[in-house]
Image (tube, grey):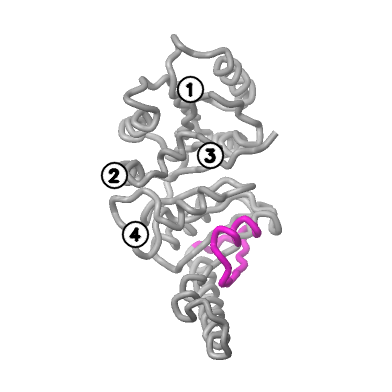
Amino acid sequence: MKQILVPTDFSKNAYSALHYATQLFKNEKVTFHLVNSFEADVIAQTKGILTRKNEEIIERLTNESHDKCKQLMHKIILDTENKLHKFETIATFLDLQKIINTLIKSKVIDYVVMGTKGISGAKDVLFGSNTVRVIKKLKGAPLLMIPGEMEFVEIKRIGFATDFTRKIRPKEIAPLIQFAKSYNAVLRILFLGKQEIITEVQRENIHELKEMLYEIDYKLFEEEILSNKTDSLLQYVMFYDFNILAMIHYKHSFLEDLLRESLVKKMGLYSNRPYLVIPEVKS
């Protein structure tokens, strides 16, 4: 049985991400763990000072969060009516990024699914501030980010962007192979580099990846490098039709450049598809 963690702030975007996840895994046995962190409310209402009155505030906020989580659980059960799916709820005043990584370990989470934006939801921004913080600290499970109030569309084309400067490990590529096999989808690999100046390291990494993809249909695309890799990725997002775009997040990867505010806003103009961020697997 799969274990899926879905953080929520009870916004429409958060519910859309949850509903998308139930449709993506509609044919699989899944336990969805719905988690709400109300840390910001605690800080705002208690100023971070522990007093008897503030303890009462925390207790009230905890009860309110529990109630909203239960309401959310009942709503998604009624909306989806899938007997393969179970739901559990978690209300916490702990930091969202810390609780996500803690639950990934304790619940053996397979995927984290969340909306790209929360309640404030600026339209021209790809990832909200909470999402960016989660990406930077994520360990142990892929993060699937769902934009806006997006309806589920069956996966037929999966985009995977990489420069092949590092070895891609089997556990890192496994989610893409799984989606490709489940939906009979094509994996479109965007090589952010040029064949005429490819290094031996890149050549070996390409060869090893191809060996891992023997069970699925895939295509390797060489994207012309513009001013830099991130601009090339922007062009790819604009012109290629795919249902999910995946990237591996590791130290000094071009994904770190994407998290800069200016690029996040540029990508936000084309944020009509899910993004899958796969954390680096250490050797």
**Of pointers 3 and 4, the one earlier in the residue sequence:** 4
- Location of mark 2 (residue): 269
Q: Nearer the viewer, mark 2 or mark 1?
A: 2
Secondary structure, mark 3, is strand
Q: Residue furthest front?
A: 49
Which disc is residue 219 wearing?
1
Spatial CA distance of label 2 from label 4 is: 13 Å
Q: Nearer the viewer, mark 3 or mark 1?
A: 3
- Residue 275 image offset from top left, x and y in percent: 45, 43
Q: In front: 234, or 174? A: 234
Alpha carbons under labels 2 and 3: distance apart: 22 Å
Residue 138, position as x, y percentages in the image: 57, 49
Disc 4 target residue = 121
Would you place residue 47 above or below residue 195 in this image? below
* Of the image marks 1 and 4, the number of the one nearer the N terminus: 4
When the figure is inspected, residue 121 is found, relative to residue 259, above or below; the finding is below
Which mark sits nearer the N-terminus, 3 or 1?
1
The residue lying toward the viewer, choosing from 27 and 117, is 117
Q: Residue at x 49, y 53 (%)?
A: 133
Magenta stretch in the rendered image? 80-103
Q: Is residue 4 visible?
A: yes
What SS does tag 1 mark?
Answer: strand
Q: Residue furthest top?
A: 196
User: What residue is rendered at 53% in x and 68% in y?
Assistant: 36
Residue wearing tag 3? 249
Residue 248 colored in magenta in the image: no
Q: Compare marks 2 and 3 and give the one earlier in the sequence.
A: 3
Q: Amino acid at mark 4?
A: Gly
- Crowdedness near tag 4: few (<14), some (14–19) or many (≥20) residues, C-alpha within 10 Å: some
